[in-house]
Image: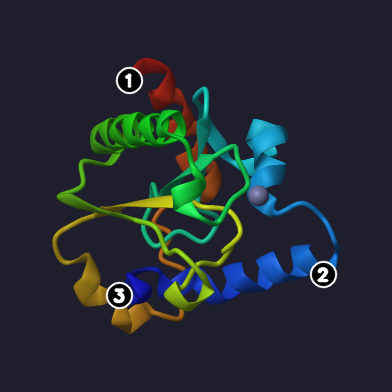
Amino acid sequence: MDIMFSPWRSQYVQSASQAKNADTLCFLCEAAVGDDISTYVVHRSDLCFVILNRYPYNSGHCMVVPYEHTGDITELSNEVMNDIGRTQQQTIRVLREMYAPHGFNCGMNLGAIAGAGVPGHIHLHIVPRWNGDLNFMPVIADVKVAIESLDDSYRKVRDAFQRIH
Ligand SMILES: [Zn+2]
């Protein structure tokens, strides 16, 4: 997982620490209460929301995030965990239809040592994978692996969430 998410992580960590230094909300809390378009929130459920990763490993890289600000998964209620699980399934349905990936990596980096860019606020990564994508990654590791623009992904994925449940 650490290798999986490393291409964008350094930028991510930098943004997160800048936000912390500025004594502002964590950016996931900002997205929780903010404007969907400017924060790239593609879907809102009752207890969690789905946001596009700004430094995607692959097109369609989403994160499922509880509204609650906690870095400790054991603090989340059954209701929140259930909603995260259901929303994960919905996100996979959406990404399957939009991108036809061959598989997914789904996971959480819990704690800074495990590679969490925002250790204080849990987020479940859902990364579409295609046969062969890992093979070309090292070659272009310095280049952001965004096959389409974030704005294109946003429109596509947000619209799909309205159709697919
Ligand atoms: Zn937060």
Q: Is residue 96 left or right of residue 80?
A: left
Check whether the beta carbons of the residues at disc 1 and disc 3 lie within 8 A of each other.
no
| Mark 3 close to ligand 1, CB under 8 Å | no
Of labels 2 and 1, the one closer to you? 2
The mark nearer the N terminus, 3 or 2, is 2
The mark nearer the N terminus, 2 or 1, is 2
Q: Is residue 136 left or right of residue 153?
A: left
Q: Tag 1: residue type?
A: Ile
Residues under labels 2 and 1: Cα distance?
39 Å
Callout 1: helix, strand or loop?
A: loop
The mark nearer the N terminus, 1 or 3, is 3
Q: Where 116 sits versus 27, above or below?
A: below
* Residue found at x 40% / y 68%: 5
Kindly identify which residue carries mark 2.
21
Q: Is residue 52 left or right of residue 126?
A: right
Q: Residue 59's x, y, as percent?
A: 38, 52
The quarter of the picture where residue 96 lies is: top left
Callout 2: helix, strand or loop?
A: helix
Split into 4 quadrants, where in the image is the N terminus? bottom left
Q: Tag 3: residue type?
A: Met
Residues under labels 1 and 3: Cα distance?
31 Å
Kindly identify which residue carries mark 3.
137
Please identify the residue farthest to the top as the structure is shown.
163
Kindly identify which residue carries mark 1.
164
Residues under labels 3 and 2: Cα distance?
32 Å
* Residue found at x 85% / y 64%: 22
The quarter of the picture where residue 83 lies is: top left
Q: Tag 2: residue type?
A: Asn
Q: Callout 2: few (<14), some (14-19), or many (20+) C-alpha neighbours within 10 Å?
A: few
Of labels 1 and 3, the one closer to you? 1
Callout 3: helix, strand or loop?
A: loop
